[in-house]
Structure formats: structure tokens, C-alpha cells
Image: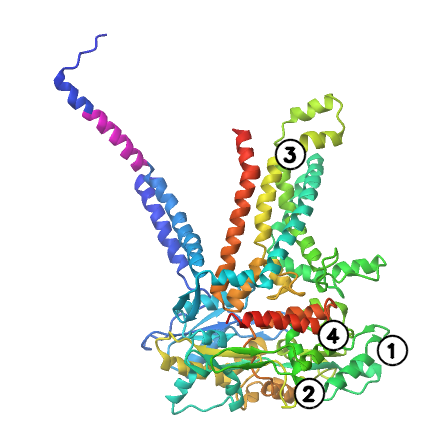
């Protein structure tokens, strides 16, 4: 087969055709993908409208003070300085962190153990998973209303049960502002664990089932005990799962609101022990009508969450990504 | 799917999505008569049923908000009014953020607006004195005391009338005649004093001599104990302070009278069930044969009036007395429902007519009562709700509405939450009454300094 030698006259048109082909390729590709950009546009527009713009506006509001209808005064960092000197803000922040840490410290080991046990259940595993997960599907306000009766000290379900067991000196739960294991903080932590356990179990279960079976088989051949297998295979294999749950669980715990508001009311009763940072933000903004101060709280909260994310990424996630690549 | 359809679908979805986002919340009525000119007067109402229904507890019929709309349309054929009805809700979906959003977006002219003075302070409401001055037909049906009590500071005037009450709640002291009889204690008087309550509550705490059940002499709603405390303190001669001509609040919790009141409250909490601090509302068994609490202060209309109407057999057992009164003859939380006009309202004259009708007409007063047990606030309003007058203590209930303490301008502000939190700590025995008041004062002063 002979290939005709291109004449000098043919050369220019051939180059142009190449460029045209590239251009056509780029624009053709763009045209072909336009439709997908169009699909992305509505949710993106909604994200900008309902998340990005309000977030930006919140940052701006934190630097102002309302002085009248449609009037405001730039006050610089005053709103933030006020927060720093307000004991109520620090109490709410400490409460939020305490409740979050207590929740994670309970729910993660409990979910890890239950998921490992569930993994060995041969009959009824699906039914058990559904039962564990059901509270997660229930509205947090509805759950809180039910637990209001569960924890009621005088005629509640839990203390009624304790009375049946012969315990007369029953805990006061939501009427006790102490830090103890039977105080209001302990009660709402139990509520959160009951409500969130199913989700944590399912994620752990997925993590356990992603660990290669061969590892377990080798360990069995080597004569490892179940505890050794758990310690040296299951737990290390669950590291990414635990990191994921600690991170997402921390964010959820920090942003906790619905159930605490229902149980504690606007002042986080009893004695502000149930007032989280988001509750304080809501109370200041929508009960006391100081939207600028509430915006300052929101900005501080945003920064805390951002720092938490960056620290968690640097400490755990970046290493996970590197290990996987 | 064809390419052209693929291209147009997302755009269509976006338009539909944005249109859906723009749809108003609530159950706005379906426009009005075609011959009514001008834009409708929009009214935000809170907590009324969307549809006709039946009360799940009492079995009584509850008229939907459409019935109030229909009654207005019938009485005012020349004015187009549109009700936007929202529920009280909870937290982030509660009425407060919705009200804030609506008034900032100039969505309505009239607002049923808890904490109206706070909105007025921000310059968002009309001083209704200006409407009264222009209205030669205006009659003060609410009484001078009620309107004086409604006045509060605004940017241009220290004594604005930012709202007119359209209905009211009430807080009375209930007492269980059966428990009094079982214990052989004299009935509670119509206007009980601090001493009488203390003595009788102490006598009726313990094992009931007839039934053997554990009885309690006293009760308090833990989460809202601050209002009970204010009634006690007022009866003991305490006064919270004042609002200056510049709109600044001067608040003093740390006084001998408040100390005495808090110490008394803490002492009385020993006669209440241990879990009262965690409660809101009435004790378990209230208005039933299972009740074990003898004296139940802060009984709110919604907790007892519809129930007693539905259960005539309980009327003689559960009686009502006045709330604690101070030397001025007043006492108990002023829990009127304020109806206010937005400064941005474009048709104020029509809105003023609507406001007056909503706040005074017999039809509206009856509607508020039939849906939520709220009581009339106008003179002669008793006639709109004859069911209440028939109760053994109906006269006390109506009179208590007229003899409350003045409105607290700090009712939704940080001083309330500071006092409530410290009161709870004192009731839980974590701090002394003195420490609680000192801390509440410190937090209040901190807030006041940043006003």
C-alpha cells in the first residue's frame, strides 16, 4: 500500500483541519457535557441560595449591631468580644463538648461490640439490624418527648422499673443538674446513645464485613484465640471506620439541638445543664431577638467545626488516604 | 430521552424548584372577593387548627382557622383579609424564626406576636396610638389598665402602644377539694396569702390519712418556675426595676424581697414531688381521680378550662383561686396575646380595622376560646364564652385576667434566662438563694451593660 506524499499546498489545510478537530473536540465535548452541567445547576443554585449566601450573610451580621429597622452599625469584633466575657457562652460550649465526648465514648465501643456479635448471628440478623436502626428514623423531637416520660423522676418509666426492682432511692434524672451518672447530662447521653446506636452498628458491621476473610482463616490456622483475632485483626481493620464515625459523630454531637431543646426548653433546664451552643444561638437569635449576637455565636461555632475538621484531617484522614494510595 | 429534552429538563426542574421555594408557608386563605380592591391585609396567626376537628382530649369540636376568616369576611365585606396560620412548633421550626423571617421580608401587616415589645424596640412595629388618634370611632374596649400595661419603649417614644391584646391566658391557683377534705384542712380562700399556702401545703404533704397514698401539698412547673417566682416575689413586695426614658432596663434581682421570695420558694419545693423541677405543665393525674397534689399554682387556661367544661363531674373537685396578689391588688403573669401592626404595612387603615375586629369582636373572642381555651380581653367578653362563666370559679378566672402583674419587658431577654437558670440551681439545692440571686444579678448586669 502506498501512501501519497502530501504536496506543500495540502499542508496548510491539514494543519487547520487538525486545529479544527481539536477545537471541535473541546467544544464538542463541552456541548456534549453541557447537559450534565445543566443537571448539576439546580442543586448547585439551591446550595448557593440556601447555604452559601446565608453563611456569608451570617459572617457579615456578626460584625454589626441592629439599631433600627433596616439600620445597623458596624461594631467590628465587639460581638465576639462580648461572647468571650459571657459565662453563659462558655457554659454552653463546655456542655456541648462534654455531651459530645460522653456520647462518643459510650456509643463507639458499644456499637463495635454489638456489631461484632451481630456479625455472627445467623438467624434474625436483619430483623435485629432493623430494630437497632429504627430509633434513627424517628424524629428527634418525638424521641425526646418519649424520653421526657421515660426519665420523669416521679412517674416515669425508668424509675417505675427501678421501684419494681426494689430501689426506693431513685435518680432524679432530668431534675438533677449535677454531673453525676444519674443527672440530666447522663440522661440525655443515654437518649443519644439509644437513638444513634443503630447507625453506628450498621457502619461498624459494614467495616467488619470488608475485612478480608483470609486474615481470619490464617489466624484460625495459627491457633489465635477469638480475643487475639479481635485485637489484632478486627480492630486494626476497623481503623478507617472508627475515624469516620468519630469525625461525623463529633460534628453531629456538636450540632445537637432538637432533643435538647425539647427536654431542656429555652434555658436548657435544669440550671442550663442541657444548653448546647446551638441552643444558645437559637435562644439569643429567635427568643431574645439579638440576631447579630446569634450570628457571632454561629461564626465562632463555624470556626470551631472548621478547626476540628482540619485537625481530624491532618491527624487521621490524610494518613488513611496516603495508606490507600 | 432526546437531547433537547435532556437540555430543557434541568431548567424546568430549577424553575419548578424555585417556584416551590417561593410558595408561602401556612394555610393562606384562597384570596378574597373579586370586588375587594387593593392588596389583602395579611395576618399572621399562631397555633390555630388548619381544619375543623375534634380535640383529642376533651372531644370538643375545634373550628379551623377558615371559620375565623369566614366570620371576618361576613362582618367586613369591603376588606380583603388573608390569614397565614402557623403552628407554635418547636425549636428551629417554631413560630419565632418564622415570625422573624416574615416581618423582615414584609410578608404580613398584622402579627399575633409574642414578645411584641422586643420587635417594637427594633422599630419594626407601628405605634398604635397614631392609628387611634386618626380614628374618631375608636372605643377603648380593653380598659385603660390593659392598654397602659401594653406600653413599651420604642426608638421615637418611651411609651408606645405596639400591640393590642386579642385574647389572654390566665394563671390561677388550683386546689383539690377531695385532698383538702381527706386531710381535714380548711378550703383554700379565694385570694390566698403566702402564709395560708405554706401552712396548708405543709399539712397535706405525706401519706393521705384516708387513701394511704403519698400526697404533696405544693407544685411548681420547673421549666417555667420563673413566672411562679415572680408572682411570689411580687406578693412579698419585690419589684424588678424599670425601663428608662431611653429604653434602657434597670433590673435588680439582688434585693431582700427577692431573697425572701426565693428562700420561700425553695422551702415550698420540699412539699412538691421531687421531679417537679423537670416538668412543664400540671402534675400527673391533674383533673382526674388519681391526683395527689393539693395546691397547684400557675394553672393555665389551656390545662383546665376545656377539660372542666368537658368533665362537669370534676368541677367541684378541682377549684380555682386567684394567683398571689401584691399590695397593689395585682399579681400573676400577664399572658395576653399581642396583636401588632408592622411598620412596613402598606395599607394601614384597612389593617387597623382588621386589628380592631380581631381583638374585640365577639366572633373572634369565641373563636380563640373554642380553639385553644384563650379568654376574652374586652369588657363584656364573658358573654362570648358563657361556658367559662358557668364554671364554679368562672368569675375568679375572668377577674384574674384583669388583675395580673404588668408586662415584663425583659420576658424574652437574657435576664429571664439568668434568673430561671439560677432559680433552678437553687431549687435543686446546688446553690443558696443568695448565691443564686447574686449570680443572676451578675449575668443580668453583664447583659445590661451591653444594651
Mark 4 in CB contact with mark 2 (< 8 angstroms)? no
Residue under numbered circle 3: A208
Q: Label 3 marks which chain's residue?
A: A
Q: Residues within 10 Å of mark 3 (few under 14, many from 20)?
A: many
Q: Which residue is drawn at 40% across and 48% down?
A: A44
Callout 2: SS = loop
Residue under numbered circle 1: B209
* Discs 2 and 3 carry the same chain letter: no
Image position, residue A23 (x, y; %) = 25, 31
Real-space CA distance between mark 4 and mark 1, rounded to the nearest whole angstrom:
26 Å
Magenta segment boundaries in residue numbering: A16-32
Mark 4 in CB contact with mark 1 (< 8 angstroms)? no
* Discs 1 and 3 carry the same chain letter: no
Q: Which residue lies furthest to the left in this view?
A: A9
Residue under numbered circle 2: B392
Residue under numbered circle 4: B266
Real-space CA distance between mark 4 and mark 2, rounded to the nearest whole angstrom:
32 Å
Amino acid at each position: 500500500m502506498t501512501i501519497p506524499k502530501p504536496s506543500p499546498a495540502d499542508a496548510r489545510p491539514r494543519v487547520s483541519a487538525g486545529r479544527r478537530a481539536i477545537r471541535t473536540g473541546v467544544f464538542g465535548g463541552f456541548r456534549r457535557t453541557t447537559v450534565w452541567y445543566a443537571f448539576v445547576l439546580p442543586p448547585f443554585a439551591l446550595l448557593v441560595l440556601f447555604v452559601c449566601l446565608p453563611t456569608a450573610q451570617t459572617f457579615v451580621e456578626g460584625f454589626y449591631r441592629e439599631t433600627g429597622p433596616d439600620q445597623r452599625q458596624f461594631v467590628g469584633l465587639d460581638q465576639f468580644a462580648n461572647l468571650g466575657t459571657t459565662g453563659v457562652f462558655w457554659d454552653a460550649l463546655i456542655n456541648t463538648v462534654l455531651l459530645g465526648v460522653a456520647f462518643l465514648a459510650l456509643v463507639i465501643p458499644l456499637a463495635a461490640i454489638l456489631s461484632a456479635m451481630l456479625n455472627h448471628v445467623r438467624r434474625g440478623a436483619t430483623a435485629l439490624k432493623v430494630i437497632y436502626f429504627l430509633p434513627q428514623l424517628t424524629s428527634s423531637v418525638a424521641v425526646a418527648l418519649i424520653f421526657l416520660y421515660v426519665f420523669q423522676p416521679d412517674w416515669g418509666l425508668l424509675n417505675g422499673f427501678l421501684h419494681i426492682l426494689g430501689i426506693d432511692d431513685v435518680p432524679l434524672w432530668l431534675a438533677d443538674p449535677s454531673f453525676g451518672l444519674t443527672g440530666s447530662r447522663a440522661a440525655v447521653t443515654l437518649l443519644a446513645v439509644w437513638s444513634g446506636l443503630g447507625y453506628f452498628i450498621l457502619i461498624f458491621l459494614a467495616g467488619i464485613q470488608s475485612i478480608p476473610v483470609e486474615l481470619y482463616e490464617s489466624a484460625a490456622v495459627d491457633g489465635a484465640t477469638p480475643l487475639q483475632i479481635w485485637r489484632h485483626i478486627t480492630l486494626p481493620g476497623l481503623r478507617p471506620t472508627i475515624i469516620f464515625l468519630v469525625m461525623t459523630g463529633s460534628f453531629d454531637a456538636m450540632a445537637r439541638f432538637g432533643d435538647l431543646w425539647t427536654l431542656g426548653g429555652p434555658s436548657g433546664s435544669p440550671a442550663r445543664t442541657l444548653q448546647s451552643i446551638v441552643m444558645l444561638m437559637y435562644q439569643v437569635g429567635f427568643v431574645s431577638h439579638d440576631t447579630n449576637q446569634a450570628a457571632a455565636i454561629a461564626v465562632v461555632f463555624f470556626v470551631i467545626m472548621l478547626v476540628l475538621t482540619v485537625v481530624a484531617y491532618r491527624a487521621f484522614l490524610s494518613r488513611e488516604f496516603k495508606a490507600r494510595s | 430521552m432526546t437531547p433537547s429534552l435532556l437540555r430543557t429538563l434541568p431548567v424546568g426542574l430549577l424553575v419548578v424548584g424555585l417556584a416551590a421555594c417561593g410558595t408561602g408557608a401556612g394555610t393562606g386563605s384562597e384570596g378574597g372577593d373579586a370586588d375587594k380592591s387593593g392588596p389583602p391585609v395579611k395576618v399572621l396567626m399562631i397555633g390555630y387548627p388548619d381544619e375543623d376537628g375534634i380535640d383529642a382530649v376533651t372531644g370538643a369540636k375545634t373550628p379551623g382557622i377558615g371559620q375565623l376568616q369566614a366570620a371576618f369576611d361576613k362582618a367586613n365585606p369591603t376588606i380583603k383579609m388573608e390569614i397565614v396560620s402557623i403552628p407554635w412548633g418547636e425549636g428551629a421550626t417554631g413560630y419565632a424564626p418564622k415570625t422573624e423571617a416574615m416581618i423582615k421580608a414584609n410578608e404580613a401587616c398584622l402579627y399575633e406576636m409574642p414578645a411584641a415589645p422586643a420587635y417594637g424596640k427594633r422599630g419594626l412595629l407601628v405605634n398604635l396610638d397614631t392609628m387611634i388618634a386618626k380614628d374618631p370611632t375608636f372605643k377603648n374596649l380593653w380598659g385603660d389598665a390593659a392598654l397602659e400595661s401594653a406600653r413599651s419603649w420604642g426608638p421615637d417614644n418611651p411609651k408606645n402602644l405596639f400591640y393590642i391584646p386579642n385574647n389572654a391566658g390566665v394563671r390561677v391557683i388550683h386546689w383539690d377539694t377531695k385532698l383538702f377534705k381527706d386531710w381535714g384542712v380548711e378550703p383554700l380562700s379565694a385570694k390566698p396569702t403566702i402564709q395560708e399556702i405554706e401552712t396548708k401545703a405543709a399539712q397535706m404533704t405525706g401519706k393521705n390519712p384516708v387513701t394511704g397514698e403519698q400526697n404533696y401539698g405544693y407544685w411548681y412547673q420547673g421549666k417555667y418556675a420563673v413566672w411562679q417566682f415572680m408572682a411570689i416575689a411580687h406578693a412579698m413586695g419585690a419589684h424588678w426595676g424599670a425601663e428608662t426614658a431611653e429604653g434602657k432596663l434597670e433590673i435588680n434581682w439582688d434585693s431582700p424581697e427577692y431573697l425572701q421570695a426565693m428562700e420561700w420558694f425553695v422551702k415550698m419545693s420540699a412539699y412538691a414531688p421531687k421531679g417537679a423541677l423537670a416538668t412543664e405543665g400540671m402534675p400527673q393525674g391533674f383533673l382526674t381521680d388519681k391526683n395527689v397534689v393539693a395546691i397547684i399554682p400557675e394553672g393555665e387556661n389551656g390545662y383546665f378550662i376545656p377539660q372542666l367544661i368537658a368533665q362537669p363531674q370534676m368541677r367541684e373537685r378541682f377549684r380555682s383561686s386567684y394567683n398571689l396578689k401584691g399590695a397593689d391588688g395585682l399579681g400573676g403573669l400577664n399572658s395576653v396575646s399581642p396583636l401588632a401592626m408592622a411598620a412596613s404595612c402598606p395599607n394601614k387603615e384597612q389593617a387597623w380595622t382588621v386589628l380592631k375586629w380581631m381583638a374585640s369582636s365577639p366572633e373572634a373572642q369565641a373563636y380563640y376560646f373554642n380553639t385553644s381555651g384563650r379568654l376574652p380581653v374586652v369588657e363584656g367578653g364573658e358573654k362570648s364564652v358563657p361556658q367559662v362563666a358557668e364554671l364554679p370559679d368562672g368569675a375568679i378566672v375572668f377577674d384574674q385576667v384583669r388583675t395580673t402583674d404588668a408586662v415584663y419587658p425583659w420576658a424574652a431577654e437574657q435576664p429571664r434566662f439568668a434568673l430561671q437558670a439560677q432559680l433552678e440551681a437553687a431549687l435543686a439545692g446546688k446553690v443558696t438563694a443568695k448565691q443564686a440571686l447574686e449570680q443572676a444579678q451578675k449575668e443580668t448586669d453583664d447583659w445590661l451593660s451591653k444594651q
